Image (cartoon, rainbow, N blue to C red):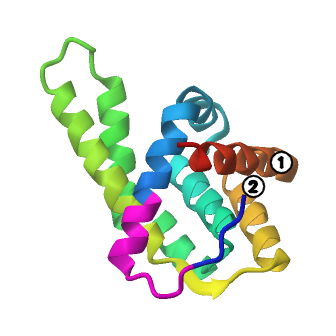
């Protein structure tokens, strides 16, 4: 179900909405998303912001999105995640790293929220989003479209 975009939202409002959307999606799709992260090099936040943009018919600025994907905060997030995953589950520092990772995930989503335009998107924006996401991971365009459909449905459920 698509909604008309709210062009009056501040960056903080949009970031909070994206975070809420992400939490709803992740609660339902966690296993599927983690599998794609592990096996298809999908960055979950990229899928979540893409699904949010499509759901709310918002354009997603490609150069901004690329800057977040290649930026220092995303690199730090990847390092923290790799380090945490390499630790023994019994390591007492592991829980703290998980907290840091969650904080970095939220920061990453906040940066991605700034890439969402206030203008209503069209089919060209949708195709660009799907293609870009497909190019950044090991998923076909059809698989990305199916994923975005799942996330849209999950993000709308209450």
Query: Can residue 40 be spotted in the picture?
Result: yes
What residue did someone put label 2 on?
Answer: 134
Looking at the picture, tell me which residue is in the foreground, 139 or 16.
Answer: 16
Residue 58: x and y, percent?
64, 76
Residue 14 on the magenta segment: yes
Majority secondary structure of the magenta segment?
helix
What residue did someone put label 1 on?
Answer: 140
At 22% from the left edge and 44% from the top edge, which residue is drawn?
A: 100
Image quadrant assignment for residue 111: bottom left
Looking at the picture, tell me which residue is in the foreground, 49 or 81.
Answer: 49
Residue 55 on the magenta segment: no
Q: Which mark is residue 77?
A: none
Q: CA distance from mark 1 to mark 2?
A: 6 Å
Crowd around label 2: few <14 · some 14–19 · many ≥20 (10 Å): many
**Residue 95 placement, left or right of 109:** left
At 39% from the left edge and 60% from the top edge, which residue is drawn?
A: 108
Image quadrant assignment for residue 135: bottom right
* Vertical position of residue 151 compared to residue 73: above or below: above
Looking at the picture, tell me which residue is in the foreground, 20 or 99.
Answer: 20
* Vertical position of residue 156 compared to residue 72: above or below: above
Residue 25: x and y, percent?
54, 43
**Residue 96 placement, left or right of 26:** left
**Residue 28 placement, left or right of 135:** left
Q: Quadrant of the N terminus?
A: bottom right
Residue 113: x and y, percent?
46, 71
Q: Which residues are magenta?
A: 6-18
Query: Dot 2: what SS?
Result: helix
At 54% from the left edge and 47% from the top edge, which residue is drawn?
A: 44
At 27% from the left edge and 15% from the top edge, which residue is drawn?
A: 88
Which residue is outermost to the front? 158
Instruction: Check if mark 1's residue and mark 2's residue have beta carbons within 8 Å.
Output: yes
């Amino acid at each position: 179900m698509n909604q008309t975009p709210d062009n009056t939202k501040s960056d903080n409002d949009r970031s909070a909405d994206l975070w809420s959307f992400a939490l709803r999606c992740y609660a339902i799709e966690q296993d599927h998303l983690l599998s794609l992260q592990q096996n298809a090099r999908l960055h979950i936040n990229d899928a979540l912001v893409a699904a949010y943009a499509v759901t709310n018919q918002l354009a997603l600025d490609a150069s901004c999105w690329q800057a977040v994907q290649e930026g220092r905060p995303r690199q730090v997030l990847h390092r923290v995640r790799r380090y945490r995953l390499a630790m023994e589950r019994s390591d007492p520092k592991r829980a703290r790293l998980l907290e840091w990772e969650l904080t970095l995930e939220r920061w990453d989503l906040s940066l991605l929220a700034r890439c969402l335009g206030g203008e209503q998107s069209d089919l060209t924006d949708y195709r660009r989003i799907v293609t870009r996401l497909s190019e950044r991971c090991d998923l076909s365009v059809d698989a990305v479209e199916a994923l975005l459909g799942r996330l849209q449905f999950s993000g709308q459920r209450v």
